[in-house]
Image (cartoon, rainbow, N blue to C red):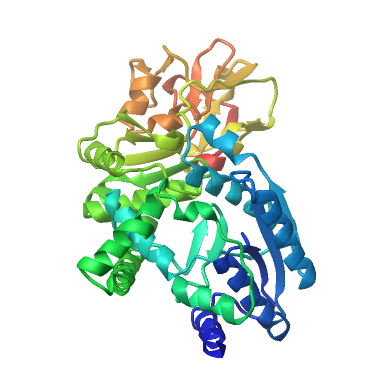
């Protein structure tokens, strides 16, 4: 089986799955695939100066689980490889969360993998899926109505929940791996549940694939593999193009919120729009597992038939909102009821929410407003301003006399006329004097009643820093 090892080495080198001095976490169940992967990496450990650690999860699904955990630990001890063995009551977890056994086990497994990688500063997680697994995954995704992403099957490298996952055995069929185990005296454990048709994947493996091989196409596995490779090429091109578009239309991003140019987004084909949304969801949540065909149809209809203020609730607490020419994508609920207020008794610099700040200086001379045309600077007549001042965000009923006008205008109407996105309105600071007269909507418009005129002798200089509102 030297050829097997050479193919393995060539594969990880060609695709740069693993390089010298990598620190790897190997997911080892004790079955043929994972035991083969462990043996192959162990054979390269000294030459490539690899640092290897093994992780095994005892799911408590079967009576043999404890013995299998002990077996994996024993193999690691014999090979002088560090191991972390975890036990978790997955059956109780899936019952509580109403999940399938496969999904429950996957979630718990990745939870531990992520914790270990952070704690041990490990760069890559190695999982032992083979070419048969890839074929079964593609077929399973076809039957469940998956799109192009699902038809890619399993990728050599994937970023899942902030983990870099590599699959170094995807070039081998299951039969080749079983031959390797036999010829190298590896003694894997076998999960009897793989023969059960209780699970959909097992029915594909045990019933559907053999039937197709016998009655339709004896080389169906090669055909499905070629399909996966073709889809990956097309998907990668579309993915790269979608990244460029996203960069062009991105207006703002944060840990919980992305703001996109709506018109720029709508100019694209629905396939590109869906990919852009996927990318944003992935950045916000780390996965897009709970988004299905209906969700994407709802999103496309929402984007096409938008009007300001419209909301769309999506899985995983993701929400979309239209605000003029922007699409806001938020993890969690939109904050429409945030209130802040600060009393100002003297000049100085004051910190405000969202890393905003306001500097107030009282000047003994009359400043020339023509020298201060920055929208983030306001000059007011000091004799017209009564302290203490109050800085706060808008409230219902707030009104002022916009500079250059005679009559009052509601702040709410001013924001609408200026097309200020509603998610920003509650965060914009407004300055009031002691009589609750509005002096300045910071960064936008001052009140005409406080402007400098021919009789002005002293001034107040307000300088506003937008902080995170930029």
In what quadrant of the picture does the N terminus appear?
bottom right
**Residue 393 horizontal/vertical position (percent):** 51, 23
x and y percent of residue 170 in the render? Answer: 46, 72
In the picture provided, is 320 more to the left or to the right than 342? left
Which residue is at a point 54% across and 30% down the rendered structure image?
A: 96
Q: Position of residue 101 (x, y in %)?
A: 50, 43
Relative to 90, 219 lies left or right: left
The structure residue drawn at horizontal position 24% and vertical position 41%, both measured from the top left corner, is 297
Q: Nearer the viewer, residue 36 or 52?
A: 36
Asked whether 259 or 159 is in front, the reply is 159
Q: Position of residue 302 (x, y in %)?
A: 25, 36
Relative to the observer, which residue lies in front, 268 or 404? Answer: 268
Q: Is residue 118 visible?
A: no
Residue at 37% of width from left, 58% of height from top? 206
Numbered marks: total = 0
The quadrant where residue 419 appears: top left
Q: Nearer the viewer, residue 215 or 231?
A: 215
Residue 406 higher or lower than 193, as above or below: above
Can residue 328 be seen here?
Answer: yes
Which corner quadrant of the image does residue 222 belong to? bottom left
Residue at the image point whose x is 28% and y is 40% from the top: 299
Q: Is residue 359 above or below residue 119?
A: above
């Amino acid at each position: 089986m030297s050829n097997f090892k050479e193919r393995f080495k060539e594969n990880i080198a060609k695709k740069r799955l693993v390089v010298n001095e990598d620190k790897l976490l190997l997911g080892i169940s004790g079955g043929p695939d994972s035991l083969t992967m462990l043996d192959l990496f162990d054979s390269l450990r000294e030459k490539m100066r690899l640092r290897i650690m093994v992780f095994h999860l005892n799911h408590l699904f079967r009576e043999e689980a404890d013995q299998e955990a002990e077996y994996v630990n024993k193999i690691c001890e014999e090979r002088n490889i560090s191991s972390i063995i975890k036990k978790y009551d997955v059956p109780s977890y899936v019952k509580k969360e109403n999940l399938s056994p496969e999904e429950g086990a996957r979630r718990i497994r990745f939870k531990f993998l992520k914790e270990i990688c952070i704690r041990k500063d490990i760069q890559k997680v190695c999982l032992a899926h083979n070419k048969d697994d890839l074929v079964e995954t593609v077929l399973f995704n076809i039957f469940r109505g998956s799109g192009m992403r699902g038809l890619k099957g399993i990728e050599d490298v994937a970023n899942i929940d902030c983990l870099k996952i590599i699959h170094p055995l995807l070039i081998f069929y299951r039969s080749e791996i079983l031959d390797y185990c036999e010829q190298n005296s590896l003694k894997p454990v076998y999960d009897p549940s793989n023969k059960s048709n209780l699970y959909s994947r097992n029915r594909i493996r045990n019933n559907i694939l053999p039937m197709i091989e016998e009655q339709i196409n004896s080389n169906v596995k090669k055909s499905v593999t070629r399909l996966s490779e073709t889809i990956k090429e097309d998907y990668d091109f579309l993915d790269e193009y979608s990244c460029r578009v996203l960069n062009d239309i991105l207006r703002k991003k944060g840990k919980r919120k992305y703001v996109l140019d709506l018109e720029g987004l709508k100019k694209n084909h629905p396939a590109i729009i869906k990919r852009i949304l996927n990318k944003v969801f992935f950045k916000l949540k780390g996965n897009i597992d709970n988004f299905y065909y209906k969700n994407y149809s709802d999103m496309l209809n929402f984007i096409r038939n938008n009007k300001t203020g419209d909301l769309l609730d999506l899985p995983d607490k993701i929400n979309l909102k239209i605000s003029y020419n922007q699409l806001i994508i938020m993890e969690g609920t939109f904050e429409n009821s945030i209130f802040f207020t600060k009393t100002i008794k003297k000049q100085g610099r004051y910190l405000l929410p969202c890393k905003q700040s306001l500097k107030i200086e009282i000047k003994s001379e009359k400043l020339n407003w023509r020298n201060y045309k920055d929208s983030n600077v306001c000059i007011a007549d000091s004799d017209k301003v009564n302290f203490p001042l109050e800085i706060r965000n808008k409230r219902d009923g707030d009104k002022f006399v916009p500079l250059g006008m005679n009559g009052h205008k509601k702040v709410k109407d001013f924001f609408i006329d200026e097309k200020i996105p509603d998610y920003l309105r509650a965060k914009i600071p407004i300055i009031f004097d002691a009589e609750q007269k509005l002096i300045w909507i910071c960064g936008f418009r001052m009140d005409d009643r406080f402007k400098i005129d021919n009789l002005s002798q002293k001034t107040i200089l307000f300088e506003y820093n937008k902080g995170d509102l930029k």
